[in-house]
Amino acid sequence: MDEPSMPTPPAGTTPPPAPSSPPGPPTPPIPLAELLASKDLGLRRIAGPAEAELLWVHTSEMADPYPYLLGGELLLSAGVLLTDPDHYVGRLVEAGAAALGFGVRPVHETVPGALIEACDRQGLPLLEVPPETPFTAIARAVWRLMAEARHRELRRVTRAQQALATAAARPDPVPAVLHQLATQLGGRAVLLTARGEEVHAAGRRLPPEPAGALTRLARVVARERPGSPASATDTHGDTHLSAYALGGGDGLVLALAAGRRESGDHTVAGIAVVLLSLLAAPHQGADAAGRSAALVRMLLGASPDEVAPLLGSTGPWTVIHARRTDGTPADALTAGALGASLGTALVDAGRGGGEAVRLLLPLPGAAARPLPEAEAEADRITPQPGWTLGASAPTPVTALDAADSLAARALAHAQATRAPLTVDAPVSGLAALVPPEEAAAHARALLAPLTAPLADTLRCWLSLHGNWDRTAVALGVHRNTVRQRIGRCGELLDADLDDMDVRAELWFALRQG
């Protein structure tokens, strides 16, 4: 028997994304009690514990559905192949199913007593589904509850974001943000150094043991060594602990402790991480304040040469372009969280839609090193779960515009090759033997007939060795569109694009842009 697929959600709701490995909940979990409260379904709990959290709905009449379960499901079955209730329930518990809904008639007139006993014995909630309630109605009810829970979470996060932003505008922003964060999460918020020294704190004090556990957790994410995680969680008794590394490279950590963990807490903490990464910079000394002032001047129109003296001690810089791997647009919150993970608060989330997130990552201490060593610093950029990244090689502040183009090209290559991270380097090797002014003039003359979209398509197509499908993926267009554009390039350039000499010359010219 083929395994049935998950029911289609009703119109007006958004289905959760397909889980990745390891799977995670698509929305806040749904308490079993909320589903049982839907009187029109007529569901009745007849065995097992009263509390459970539902993440999915799945229907199966297989004798052993274990291979098809992700964990957290409400499994619906009429018991067509039920022969050994104890083994069947054991497999469901082993797979992490949240509850079992058993439909009576036409296969069974009542729920088998052996199944009730097995669920009671193994701690699996068992629901009796009356004959007049179709399984699709239960699935629709769960989807509706998921949508409502998601909306509640979004409203809570929005309120928290507004409160944290207001706190950040106060004269004492860091303590104010910590106080507001502790209020929103109902616990304690502490800003710690890499050595565990308390900088600021807000919320109720913790007993010595959980306070010590929180400090130890903070040391796990403190950026004192390469490869430290950006965040970590733990529990101490009934207290939920979490720690987040702040951007800036000085090892500051936001540590949180709360008696409960609600949906949206991680997002609220992520907002605070971004704000504190920005706000804590003035407390890190005059150099950080000078760098902030330099960036402001650059944003207001000053030339890179004017601000380079203030930024020289922190160069070179790497530009990173990023897009969500699943194709969903990135917002300011997810972009800020990505910046915090990479150790920078310099993030441009763009205007949404298909735009890439752009980040500016300083490489402290690499300015005085030989180029190979500086490039090794860039190699420490690590792939980020859920993101596809393209990074430039280290560059001085006076060449950030060129690095921005390199990062964009690296991202396109990473998407086409399905790599989590690609680093693009400036022109080197034989191309470096040609004076830059002459190379640029030759490129302008050769590529003059091409519009910007055609040149971008040709650059991507050549970088992927003329592969139509990969180029289409990288550009987000149909493969026939790629063929049409490349054909048009050949016509405008009056060149045979299958000739390797032509390709090499065009590639050289395109690399100058």
Image (tube, rainbow, N blue to C red):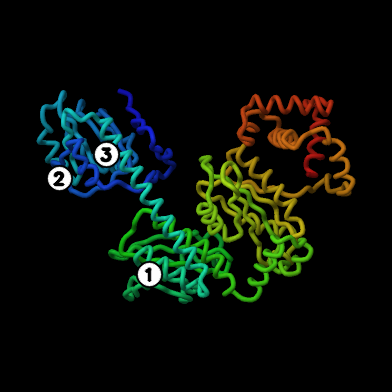
For discs 2 and 3, the disc positioned in front in the rendered view: 3
The amino acid beneath tag 3 is Leu
Residue 71: quarter of image = top left
Residue 259: quarter of image = bottom left
Mark 3 surroundings within 10 Å by alpha-carbon count, few (fewer than 14), some (14 through 19), many (20 or more): many
Residue 302: quarter of image = bottom right
Residue 476 x, y percent position in the rendering: 61, 34
Q: Residue at x 16, y 24 (%)?
A: 107
Viewer-closest of 243 and 152: 152
315 horizontally vs 155: left or right: right
Mark identifier at residue 188: 1
Residue 293 x, y percent position in the rendering: 67, 69
Viewer-closest of 483 and 71: 483
Mark identifier at residue 70: none
Alpha carbon distance from label 2 to label 1: 39 Å
- Residue that mark 2 sits on: 121
What secondary structure is found at the residue carrying circle 2?
helix
Report if the CB atoms under discs 2 and 3 are less than 8 Å apart.
no
The amino acid beneath tag 2 is Arg
- In what quadrant of the picture does the C terminus appear? top right
Residue 101 visible to an observer of this rendering: yes
Q: Is residue 507 above or below residue 278?
A: above
What secondary structure is found at the residue carrying circle 3?
strand
Q: Earlier in the sequence, mark 2 or mark 1?
A: 2
